């Protein structure tokens, strides 16, 4: 059937379809990967289109639905995709949107002032990677169209995203307008086609914060099951109640966002500062265009900085020119305020950037065209022209806010905080210099219990932080000393969330860790200097182990965040069980895998449950947990850096109310630790890309 349709197309259309075939052949080029991330990417392409329509004032509500059959849909109440025939292409606007790759520019340049999303290739990629896709457009009349993807056995090629027929008028609904797109991700393309509820709800919530006033709903109609092994050893499948629909709408936008981020922390002043402006900008090689800069600033009584930045609704985890401009603008404004209000005396040196970072929680968003994303994970804004524009907007905005009645106390508080930080910096400069020198010195002299590797190549070197002296001893026997270092931890390290930087530096275990990594600490941390590009936390799979893992991650998050951002921090996964018989040995990392391994080993099997790393022999530890060829590592990522910071504040910080609420809602501790993992871990190794859950 599909074949017939294709033959009725003219040459130009065929070229279009061949375009989509390229997406099938190399999906990674268009959506990054065919794992869970790629799967969600094709949903975001559709969501982004509706967000654009809403952000430009044409739609007020967007509903994402996950259907029982595994398909997903996005509905908006915007103008509706263009239904008329595009003169150049000779096909309807709808068909064009879903069959033509839109490299860079969106389907209709000049339609939107700003357009969010990945500036990728648009809805056609979703179509190309779906088994089928349906679209319904309402503009008083109702129009619909359907596309399918099949494999042409005879000609050995994909016919993907092929219209079943042209756009058809299928009804009328006077007064209604909007677009509805539903699609079935193709399981012949993706390693998994299971939508991740948490990933989707977190992103939709973030989009609701970033696009104030837009209502974003999420409905999950899928049937939920829990499977476990019953008393009789049989697998039990238990049906869970369906998820309730959720709805996000924030009329305060970024102000609501920073308040949400600060939920677990004590605030330094009541209301965040907020400003937004549109400016002209000329990027090298492009015509003059507009840029929108928007920010909300608040301060907590903690001493860490949390700056979350976005460009066109994409989180720029690695920072870039907009962040630099923001910090410069803030620094200049605070310096000016402090100077003219007597906080900085004539004899005082001006503040430096570090002084204004303490306790800062801020969200910065930039909207612009022709974005250049750089960095390891393409989350760093690389357009230098943005820096002075953002700097100017921040200065201008803060000056206006200073002159606004009622903001005086806020600016006094900010200036006082900066002064306090500057005084502290000057007072402790000496101590910090010593710590810095210690950490940059040759690790071999200073690190007591560290069994250092002999190699000097950070790309190859691995540091295992091992819970307990006995497991540490085993790991030392098991390791390959050329590239594997072992740092045993005695007891629990200091929980730094409740401690100052200086207290952290006085803690023996942490001092050892800092000097082992050799790249400094806190404000002086320089990820380029790291001795290890794999820092692997190896703790038992029990509650103490989880707690140690949590404390270490909090430490890295707070004082070596760039190490996490660079993807150098990992969690080692020791197996929970050994299933064996004569000379067959299999390891299982969870209960589900245990069942599989029992089947694999067959009759006469025996099971050993490992209670801790210390119970394993050196050979076993090597084979299951340390050998790069067979081990199972989870890479810690900060994709969800905002949520990670918030949860860490809540669980490890000084305010008890949030923690109590959180613990009440997540009654057992395992689950709490599991939640943290969920927030910012990603599994690597055996299954390369799926999110890691408890
Ligand atoms: C271009 C022009 C017009 C609407 C849209 C695009 C549009 C696209 C999407 C994608 C998802 N939802 C959408 N809603 C609108 C309007 C053209 C006109 O007014 O004739």
Image (cartoon, helix red, strand yellow):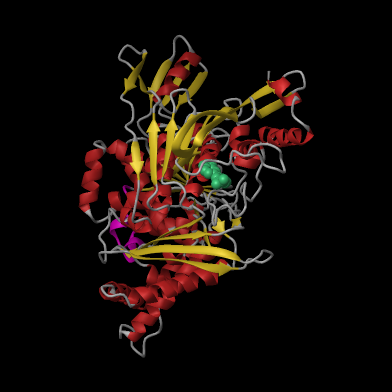
The N terminus - image quarter:
top right
Report if residue 618 is visible in the image.
no
Left or right placement of residue 53 versus residue 660 in this view: right
Residue at the extreme top:
603
Residue nearer the viewer, 52 or 577: 52
Above or below — where is 470 with respect to 418?
above
Residue positioned most to the bottom: 346
Task: Give x and y (percent) for residue 58.
Answer: 47, 49
Residue 504 is a magenta residue: yes
The quarter holding residue 129 reads: top right
Q: Position of residue 400 (x, y in %)?
A: 37, 75
- Vertical placement of 592 versus 348: above or below? above
Task: Determine the image quadrant of residue 14.
Answer: top right
Q: Nearer the viewer, residue 17 or 469?
A: 17
Foreground of the two, 321 or 279: 279
Q: Which residues are magenta?
A: 491-507
| Spot occupied by residue 64 in the image (x, y as percentages of width and height) | 43, 36
In the foreground, 632 or 421: 421
Residue at 63% x, 51% y: name it.
105
Horizontal arrangement in the rendering, residue 341 relative to residue 133 (left or right): left
Quarter of the C terminus within the rendering = top left
Residue at position x 48%, y 39% from top? 178
Q: Is residue 368 magenta?
A: no
Q: Is residue 455 above or below residue 204?
A: below
Q: Residue at x 58, y 68 (%)?
A: 281
């Amino acid at each position: 059937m599909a074949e017939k349709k294709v033959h009725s197309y003219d040459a130009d259309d065929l070229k279009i379809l061949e375009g989509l075939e390229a997406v099938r052949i190399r999906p990674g080029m268009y959506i990054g990967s065919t794992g869970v991330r790629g799967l969600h990417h094709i949903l975001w392409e559709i969501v982004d289109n509706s967000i654009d329509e809403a952000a430009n004032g044409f739609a007020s509500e967007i509903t994402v639905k996950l259907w029982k059959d595994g398909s997903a849909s996005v509905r908006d109440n915007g103008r509706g995709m263009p239904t008329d025939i595009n003169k150049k292409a000779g096909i309807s606007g709808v068909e064009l949107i879903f069959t033509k790759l839109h490299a860079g520019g969106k389907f209709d340049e000049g339609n939107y002032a700003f357009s969010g999303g990945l500036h990728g290739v648009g809805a056609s990629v979703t179509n190309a990677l779906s088994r089928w896709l349906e679209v319904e457009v309402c503009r008083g009349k109702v129009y619909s169209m359907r596309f399918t993807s099949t494999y042409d056995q005879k000609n050995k090629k994909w016919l993907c995203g092929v219209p079943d027929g042209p756009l058809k008028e299928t009804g009328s609904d006077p007064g209604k307008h909007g677009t509805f797109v539903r699609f079935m991700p193709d399981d012949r393309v993706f390693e998994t086609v299971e939508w991740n509820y948490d990933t989707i709800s977190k992103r939709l919530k973030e989009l609701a914060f970033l696009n104030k006033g837009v209502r974003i709903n999420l409905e999950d109609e899928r049937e939920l099951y829990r499977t476990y092994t019953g008393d009789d050893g049989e697998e039990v499948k238990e049906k869970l109640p369906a998820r309730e629909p959720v709805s996000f709408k924030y009329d305060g936008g970024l102000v609501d966002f920073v308040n949400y981020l600060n939920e677990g922390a004590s605030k330094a002043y009541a209301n965040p500062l907020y400003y937004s402006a549109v400016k002209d900008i000329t990027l090298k090689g492009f015509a003059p265009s507009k840029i929108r800069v928007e920010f909300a600033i608040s301060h907590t009584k903690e001493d860490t900085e949390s700056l979350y930045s976005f460009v066109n609704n994409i989180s720029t985890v690695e920072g870039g020119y907009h962040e630099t401009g923001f910090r410069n603008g803030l620094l200049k404004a605070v310096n000016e305020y402090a100077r003219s209000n007597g906080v900085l005396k004539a004899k005082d040196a001006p503040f430096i950037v570090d002084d204004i970072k303490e306790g800062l929680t801020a969200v910065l968003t930039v909207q612009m065209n022709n974005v250049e994303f750089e960095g390891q994970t393409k989350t760093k804004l690389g357009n230098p022209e943005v820096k002075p524009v953002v700097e100017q907007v921040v200065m201008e905005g803060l000056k206006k806010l200073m002159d606004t009645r009622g903001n005086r106390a806020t600016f006094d508080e900010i200036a006082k905080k900066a002064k306090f930080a500057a005084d502290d910096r000057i007072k402790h400069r000496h101590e910090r210099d010593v710590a810095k020198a210690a950490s940059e010195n040759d690790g071999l002299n200073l690190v007591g219990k560290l069994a250092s590797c002999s190699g000097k190549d950070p790309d190859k070197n691995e540091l295992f932080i091992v819970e307990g002296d006995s497991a540490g001893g085993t790991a030392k026997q098991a390791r390959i000393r050329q590239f594997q270092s072992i740092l045993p931890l005695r007891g629990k390290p200091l929980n730094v969330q409740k401690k100052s930087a200086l207290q952290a530096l006085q803690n023996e275990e942490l001092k050892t860790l800092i000097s082992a990594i050799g790249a400094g600490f806190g404000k002086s941390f320089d990820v380029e200097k790291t001795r290890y590009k794999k820092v692997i936390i190896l703790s038992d799979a029990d509650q103490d182990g989880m707690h140690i893992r949590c404390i270490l991650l909090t430490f890295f998050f707070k004082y070596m965040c760039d190490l996490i951002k660079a993807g150098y921090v990992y969690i080692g996964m020791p197996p929970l069980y050994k299933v064996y018989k004569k000379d067959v040995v299999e390891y299982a990392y969870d209960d589900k895998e245990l069942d599989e391994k029992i089947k694999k080993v067959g009759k006469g099997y025996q099971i050993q449950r490992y209670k801790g790393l210390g119970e394993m022999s050196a050979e076993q530890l090597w084979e299951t947990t340390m050998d790069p060829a067979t081990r199972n590592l989870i890479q810690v990522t900060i994709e969800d850096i905002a949520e990670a910071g918030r949860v860490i504040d809540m669980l490890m910080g000084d305010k008890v109310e949030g923690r109590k609420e959180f613990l009440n809602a997540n009654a057992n501790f395992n689950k709490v630790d599991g939640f943290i993992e969920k927030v910012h871990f990603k599994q690597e190794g055996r299954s390369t890309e799926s999110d890691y859950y408890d």
